[in-house]
Image (cartoon, helix red, strand yellow):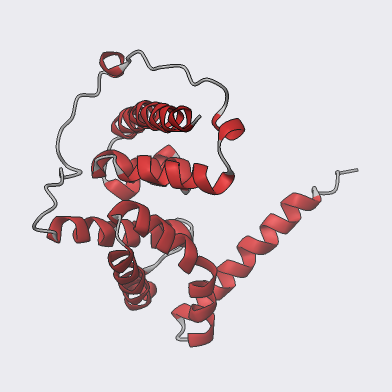
Amino acid sequence: MPSEPAAGNVAGADVASGEVLLVERARQGDAEAFSALISKYERRVYRMARQITQNDEDAEDVLQDTFLKAYEHLPSFQGQSKFYTWLTRIAVNESLMKLRKRKSDRTVSLDENIETDEESIVREIAVWDGTPEERYGQEELRAILDEAIQSLKPIFRTVFVLRDVEEMSTEETAEMLGLSIAAVKSRLLRARLQLREKLTRIFKRKGDQILGYV
C-alpha cells in the first residue's frame, strides 16, 4: 500500500497550486488576483531592493516599477520558473538600473570580469570574543548586519542578497544576473569573507567603545 504524502508536502503543494491559480487569473486580467500577488510579495521585493540600492526612496521606486512591469509583461510569463523568481529578476534589474543612474555612485557593472580564483582571497580574520548574540540584542545585530551588507560593492551585495537573504539557489541567481554558476559562487564567497571581516572590525570597534565607558 502506498504511503500517504507528508502533511508538509501537501501544504506546500496547496500553496504552490494556489499561486499558480492566482497568476493564471491575473494573466486573464483579474485585478484582484494581481493585487493578492502584490500583497504576498511586496515586502520581500522592497526589502531586497532596499538592500541593493541602500536607499528608501529608490527602493520604493523599484517596488512600484517592478509590479508595473510585472503586470505589463504578465501575459508573457510562461510559468517555466516560479512567479517569485521571475518577479525577483525584474526587481534586481530595476535596482541595478537605479544604481547605474546615480551620477555620484561609481558602481562596478555586474558584467565586469573579476578574479574567480577563490584561493587567492582567503585571509586571516580575527576571532570574535564570545558570540555576537551574547553581546548584542537582536535589533542591534540586525542594524550591524545591514551596515555591513550595505558596505559591499554592488556586484557582491546583489549576489549575497539573492543567495543568503532571499535564499535563491545558485542556479536561479546565475540566471537572474546573467552570470555563470562559478561566478556566482566566487562572488558569494567574496561577499561572505568581506562581511566576516567587516563584522569583525565593527564588533571590535563597539567592544572598544564599551570598554572605554567602563
Q: Residue 156: give x, y in percent of width and height.
A: 29, 38
Q: Residue 74: give x, y in percent of width and height.
A: 38, 73
Q: Residue 130: give x, y in percent of width and height.
A: 57, 22
Among all residues in the image, which is located at the extreme left? 103
Closest to the observer: 34 or 209? 209
The quarter of the picture where the N terminus appears is: top right
Q: Which residue is drawn at 43% across and 29% down?
A: 212
Does residue 175 sit above or below 210 in this rendering?
Answer: below
Query: Which image quarter: residue 2?
Result: top right
Look at the image and tell me whether residue 168 can be seen: no
Q: How many labels does the image show?
A: 0
Q: Residue 99: give x, y in percent of width and height.
A: 20, 56
Look at the image and tell me whether residue 63 can be seen: yes
Closest to the observer: 179 or 159? 159
Among all residues in the image, which is located at the extreme right? 1
Closest to the observer: 21 or 54? 54
Q: Residue at x 54, y 77 (%)?
A: 36
In this picture, residue 115 sits left or right of residue 66: left
Does residue 141 sit above or below 48 in this rendering?
Answer: above
Query: Which image quarter: residue 90?
Result: bottom left
In this picture, residue 98 sits left or right of residue 59: left
In this picture, residue 113 sits left or right of residue 147: left
Q: Which residue is drawn at 15% across and 43% down?
A: 108
Does residue 107 sit above or below 25 in this rendering?
Answer: above
